[in-house]
Image: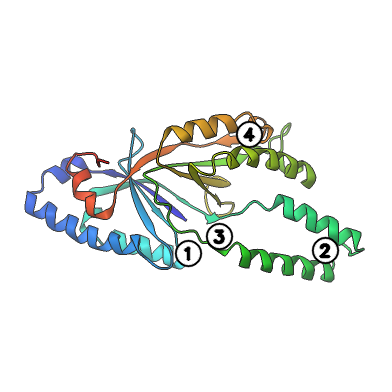
Amino acid sequence: MLHQMFRVRWTAWKQLDTNDQKTILQEAADAIEKMEQNASGQSAIFSLLGHKGDLLFVHFRNSFEKLNSVELVLSRLRLFDYLEQTTSYLSVVELGLYESTVKTYESLIERGIEPNSPEWSAEIEEVLNRQREAMHSRLFPEMPPQKYASFYPMDRKRGEAINWYTLPLQERQRQMHEHGLVGRRYAGTVKQIISGSIGFDDWEWGVTLFADDPLVFKKLIYEMRFDEVSAVYAAFGSFYVGVRVPARDLATVLGGKAIKD
């Protein structure tokens, strides 16, 4: 996953005559519309609210090479002469496997298999292969269709007094289970995609939420703040909230008008 945040260089953009703007927007709409429909992962644009930027591009692809190709294609569009990238976020879709991991470890230990032995590693790899196959659609999701998106990065605290990574696996599993119960209550109203970014970006995870009612973002995140895993161990970055802009409606937004229902 790649999130790109842009600010429009409005002064330069408004100095263009109408025909130039139309030509530039047509070129961009043609290219981005192909990305919206790409078979190996889609892209979507959102019009950001607030001072942090004007546009949010979200890209799903099945390799970093294809994400890099997206960046390069976009950078060659004339429209991008009038956009300034304010920040970005690189991550990979990640599934929480605490419960299945604990069950697998306990089962292997009960069978007398020595942790980290060749047999242990082979058994773990077999389980992971089954999970990859069963969860392929979740690991490589299609772009959710909802109207609004909210994105924020987060860390698990690891200071001297409070350190998530020093907790036993079973305790982390318990807290994440309780945390997940809250999210499941919103399963019909919000689509949540968790992406891991350790080694890829400045935070450890990215959270992208999609919904047709933006108030759901506030309700869900507020309720989750009371879970022990969030109240004690979570640190959050900046939040970005936007309204979906189909590629063909870019002209509306860059014309200074909001997308109507």
Residue type at numbered disc 4:
Ser
Q: Nearer the viewer, residue 106 or 16?
A: 106
Tag nearer the camera, 4 or 2: 4
Q: Which residue is mark 2?
A: 116
Marks 4 and 2 sit apart, C-alpha to C-alpha, by 31 Å
Q: Quadrant of residue 176?
A: top right
Secondary structure state at the residue bearing disc 2 = loop
Q: Foreground mark, 4 or 1?
A: 4
Which residue in the structure is indicated by mark 1?
64
Mark 3 or 4 closer to N-term? 3
Q: Earlier in the sequence, mark 3 or mark 1?
A: 1
Q: Is residue 208 left or right of residue 83?
A: right
Mark 4 and mark 1: span between their CA atoms? 30 Å
User: Can the viewer see residue 250?
Assistant: yes
Which residue is identified by label 4? 230
Camera-side mark, 3 or 4:
3
Measured in 3D between alpha carbons, the distance from the residue under mark 3 to the one under mark 4, in whole angstroms, is 24 Å
User: What is the image's colouring?
Assistant: rainbow
First in sequence, mark 4 or 1: give its number: 1
Residue 63 position, x and y percent, is 49, 66
Q: In terms of secondary structure, where does tag 1 sit?
A: helix
- Nearest-to-viewer mark from 3 and 1: 3
Residue 26 numbered mark, or none:
none
Can you identify the residue that label 3 sits on? 139
Q: Nearer the viewer, residue 28 or 37?
A: 37
Q: What is the residue that sits farthest to the front in this orientation?
A: 188
Identity, as a three-letter code, of the amino acid under mark 1: Phe
